[in-house]
Amino acid sequence: MTWAFSNCRSLISVVIPGSVTNIDTYVFAYCSSLTNVTMLDGVKSVGSSAFEGCSSLTNVVMPDSLTSIGSSAFSGCGFTNLTVPNSLTSIGNSAFQGCRNLLHVAIPSSATSIGNSAFAYCSVLASVTMNGTSIGANAFLACSYLLSVILTNNVTCFYAMILQ
């Protein structure tokens, strides 16, 4: 299903049933009018660039079954707040890069890997709560309004230039 619905400029809302366990690469990329995505329980992974460039995407409901968010999966999306489920184990490289409206993100302790540049260029990001264990290089590069970062004892590995 790669590229199946990409560039559908009139698509506004998507409900992904639990029978779909993997949202494929680029499947909804560049759907510029897409505002709401609801993933039902059973969805386990969001593929690379699945929602990349969906600049109007402001509401995403992620199920408790979700374990993996691929590289650039939500890069350039429009949401302001992001809470990922406690089931999530990995956030890929550049997964949320360039989400210019993102103000707050909460990452659970289950997320043991946060990829390189995962939140880079989220220019208005003000607060981050993180329980993950490994945070990649440039994870928060160019987040110039970042005021609050709360880390727990679970964080064991920082890579170069996490904040700049």
Image (cartoon, helix red, strand yellow):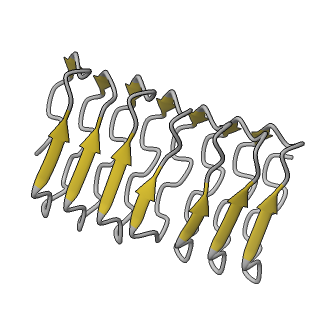
* Number of marks present in the image shown: 0
22 horizontally vs 143: left or right: right
Decide which of 132, 55 is in the foreground and name it: 132
Q: Is residue 157 above or below residue 149?
A: above
Residue at point 49% right, 29% down?
90
Q: Residue at x 46, y 69 (%)?
A: 79
For residue 7, what is the image quadrant?
bottom right
Q: Residue 44: x and y, percent?
A: 71, 35
Residue most extreme to the right: 19
Q: Is residue 30 left or right of residue 141?
A: right
Residue farthest to the top, as pictured: 156
Instruction: Report the side of 2 relative to 34 (left or right).
Output: right
In this view, the residue in front, 53 or 154, is 154
Q: Residue at x 66, y 75 (%)?
A: 34
In the rendered image, the vertical position of residue 135 relative to residue 138, given as above or below: above
Q: Quadrant of residue 112?
A: top left
Question: Compared to 132, does 34 lie above or below?
Answer: below
Question: x%, y% of residue 82?
Answer: 43, 57
Q: Quadrant of the C terminus?
A: top left
Residue 104, image x, y percentages: 30, 60
Residue 73 percent location from the top left of the image: 56, 48
Q: Residue at x 29, y 66 (%)?
A: 103
147 or 63, nearer to the observer: 63
- In the depicted structure, whether residue 158 falls above or below residue 102: above
